[in-house]
Image: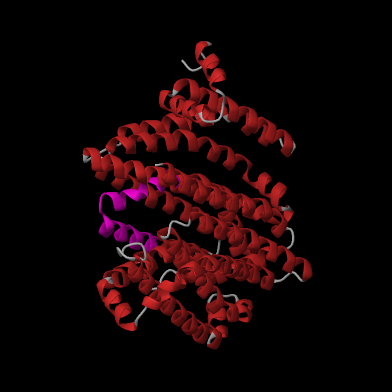
Amino acid sequence: MVSFLSNVFKLTTGTTLAQIAGIILIPVVTRIYSPEFFGVNQLFISIAAVIVGISSLTYDSTVMLPKNDEDSMNIFALCALCILGTSVAVGIVFIGFGDWFGDFFGTPLIADYFMWLPFFVAFSGFFMLLSEWLSRRVKFGALSKGIVMKTTSTRIIQIGGGLAAASPLGLILGTVGGTGLAVLLMLRVLKEDVALLKTVTAKRMKELAIRYKEFALYGSAGGIANSMSWELPAFMLAFFFSPAVLGYYALAMMAVGLPMGIVGTAIAQVFFQKASEEKNHTGSVKAVVREIHTRLISIGIFPFIVFVILAEDLFTFVFGADWLTAGTYARILAPWFFAVFIFTPISGLFGVLEKQREQLFFEIATLCTWALIFYVGGTFGDPALTLSLFSLGGMLIWGSKGAYLVKASRAGYRDSTLSLFRYLLLSVVISLPLMIAEYMGLPFLILLGIAGIIAVAYYLLLFFTDTLFRREFMEILQGSIPAKYIDWMEQSGIFR
């Protein structure tokens, strides 16, 4: 258990540090590059993301499965060949037909940067592959260092390139270079496993490719559907609107997505472990679904209400006056962000309950919904309307997915529904002073002060009215505050 917790701490600490570093450096990047340049970079990343998801034919997901390291190394070599072959094919297609792709996406400027696409696909594919290998070899410290290197070096290269000559090239080189440096750092650890390379043979790679062929067939289909469902908005915004609109959307997604990722990933990991454990012990997961889902609603809804009120002022203050529109887009997308936040952690139930077929159905339904929404919105030529439809559709899609999982877990809707309405009403009532101050046009720093005060009021109220929240908070305190102070708090009646 100690070893397990130690490894988890290494990995999650590195991930969190990397994300925090990325968040801190974003305001510097936004003051160097224009929204149009951000849009070109986002389109580049979105194209690559779809390709990277299938660059190894998802055989990288099988690296952990073989009983012996020799077979795992053969799979590693198989994946490496697939990634290199995909990268070469990408280079031929996108460099050879770069102008056509640029015109198709309504962003001719991106054709100048497709020469970097095969490198990014290769680096990203190897980053995913090495992550699986290092996890198998229980080298979470090395994996954590790779994650930190990727995020921080990306931002540093982007800042340096922008100061030299601000253009999409600086952003793209940062994206490519940061991933490449992370791969080189992780490869240094692989030298300890060089002896295993001698066990790699073409015959064994072929046998393992056949053994895990379902991953290539069904995993690739699911991977494409999942990647496209996340990246399709970027493609459609580029197709119907300008690179600047895509840039505003990219910053909105980045600024909100990174903090959400810090909390959401940790919650998802804990939920998956607890749900799997409960299912093995009791054959049911309804108790843990009720517990964690209602807590997500009570803890998460208040920050999103405050964010809706302050989004535009917050974006202009943090990222600069040129990014007001990104704040508007972020406000529009807030309901969808909230739905993603409260339902993403329980998405692990698809695996726990062995509902992969249903998961693929939701991925395809999401993809089709996005295509319809962006086609309708793009036809009207209004980005705000398009994103409003997207936010509403996203809330319904994720709500439907969550409702299905809650039903499949037999947890029942009553607790979740009551929690949603109760804490939504409470958040709105407590936020009234902030709404009034925003309406009066008070300075942003005063608005932040009011937001801080009402946040303390909300979470204190939650602390004294929610027994489970109070118990979990106490457990956290016991790990960080001397026992004598905990005893004093309990004796004084604070935690009753």
Q: Residue furthest front?
A: 195
Q: Is residue 354 above or below residue 309?
A: below
Of residues 195 and 402, which is closer to you in this image? 195
Say whether residue 235 is magenta: no
Name which quarter of the figure residue 2 lies in: top left
Residue 264 screen position, x and y as percent: 47, 46
Q: Which of the pair 77/61 is nearer the observer?
A: 77
The majority secondary structure of the magenta stretch comes to helix
**Quick one: quadrant of the N terminus?**
top left
Whether residue 491 is visible, yes or no, is: yes
Q: Is residue 350 magenta?
A: yes
Residue appearing at x 29%, y 60% in the figure: 361
| Image side of residue 198 versus residue 235, left or right | left
Drawn side of residue 322 relative to residue 187, left or right = right
Q: How many marks?
A: 0
The answer to whether residue 39 is left or right of residue 234 is right
Q: Position of residue 8 (x, y in %)?
A: 46, 47
Q: Residue at x 51, y 64 (%)?
A: 380
Compared with residue 27, is residue 85 higher up or lower down, i.e. above or below?
Answer: below
Viewer-proximal residue among 315 and 119: 119
Whole-percent x, y for residue 395 in the image: 42, 49
- Where does the image place residue 125, in percent across and percent down from the top left? 47, 71
Query: For the magenta stretch, what is the residue range?
Result: 341-369
Q: What color scheme is it?
A: secondary structure
Toward the left, the furthest residue is: 283
Q: Residue at x 34, y 32 (%)?
A: 415
Is residue 401 visible in the rendered structure shown here? no
